[in-house]
Amino acid sequence: MSDQDRLGRYEAMLRGLERRHSLRRLSGRSGIDFASNDYIGLATSPRLKAAVAAALEAGVPVGATGSRLLRGNDPAHAALEAEAARFFGSEAALFFSGGYMANLAVIGTLPQKGDLLLMDDLIHASAHEGARAGRAEPVLFAHNDAGAAEDAIRAFRAAGGTGKVWIAAESLYSMDGDRAPLADLLALADRQDGFLLVDEAHATGVYGPDGRGLAAGFEGRENVVVLHTCGKAMGGSGALVTLPKVLADIIVNRCRPFIFATAPSPLMAVAAQAALTIMTDEPERRERLAALVAHAGRRLRETCSLAPSGSQILPVIVGDNGRAMALAGLLQHAGYDVRGVRPPTVPPGTARLRISLTLNADQPAVDGLFDLLGAALREQAA
């Protein structure tokens, strides 16, 4: 068999993606940041850099060199988990290598056979992977619709289902920038003697007291499990899961992604712990971001006649893949790093620009971006 025959089907797949304007390529960082999740600018914080440098000087290793259950359990991991439990008000916390792995681990381990796993229709891909890896019956409910979730529970019970109910949602959705009805979902979980799983990936560091997120008001309850990523507003990498101690012990004993994976870098544990301190000490970061969000919302209405999401994530839905990518290319060429997002990341027919507001940009940059975008949208519509 020739190399061409062996690889031909993959080349055909790539050609098909290119025809549909869905082919993805890696590209470097350039232009003003309207694409990252470094919302409060911690990735380049001098205090974060100093904490990591001091840890290196003190002998903290770069790599864990093994799983947490072997020699990979560094004191830096334990120190972070203890501080995170205190900071977020939970009984226990566990540190994972990233949010994707944490979602896969938690959702694939905690819901049991016979349970009902309810997931918001727009929840992150990692939650779907966790559902596929797990033992509970997964059912999607209409986005941000607690009533639809309750209907799914009624159907489950009517069909003879007797297991526990687990409801999984993001607090702030990464592609639309809208918030989940967490209070309604928690009330539903309470009525069903069930559990609520909240992914705070895009809310941690940005919302809540000291940046504790949108679930801060009920985190620490025995039926609430919360995921906080450390690679977005917290500026490093990894993820923290806060939960009751008994569930943490189940993960340590039964969760394959935790048991068999090399532990996260101890240096990233140090960075995450430092980020928690900075989030408390420097509330002005969140205040500056809130002012930028308000300004950008006004400019989006003025220049593009679009309603803002109310968060630091501003989607501009274009619809067609090719048009979305052409707009992104225009903005990038002008020095604004805005990325196009296409299916399957978003539903078919909703290709968009995802404009992410961070402290790496300022109001004049926002003005320039929206002036150019508004003109381009009007030209496309003409």
Image (cartoon, grey):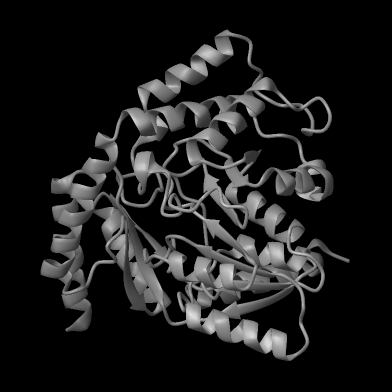
- Figure label count: 0
Residue 319 picture location, percent across and down: 37, 80
Return the residue found at the far top.
58
Measured along the vertical axis of the image, is residue 297 above or below residue 349? above
Residue 339 picture location, percent across and down: 38, 59
Frontmost residue, 349 versus 299:
299
Measured along the vertical axis of the image, is residue 54 above or below residue 33? above
The residue at the point 60 percent across, 78 percent down is: 140
The C terminus is located in which quarter? bottom left
Q: Is residue 361 visible?
A: no
Frontmost residue, 18 versus 1:
18
Return the residue found at the far right.
1
Frontmost residue, 346 versus 250:
250
State the image quarter where residue 375 is shown.
bottom left
Measured along the vertical axis of the image, is residue 252 above or below residue 126? above
Q: Is residue 223 visible?
A: yes
The residue at the point 60 percent across, 30 percent down is: 82
The residue at the point 63 percent across, 10 percent down is: 59
Frontmost residue, 274 versus 115:
115
The residue at the point 37 percent across, 52 percent down is: 35
Relative placement, left or right, of 59 versus 256 is: left
Residue 306 picture location, percent across and down: 21, 73
The N terminus is located in which quarter? bottom right
State the image quarter where residue 196 is shown.
bottom right
Residue 105 picture location, percent across and down: 71, 53
State the image quarter where residue 295 is shown.
bottom left
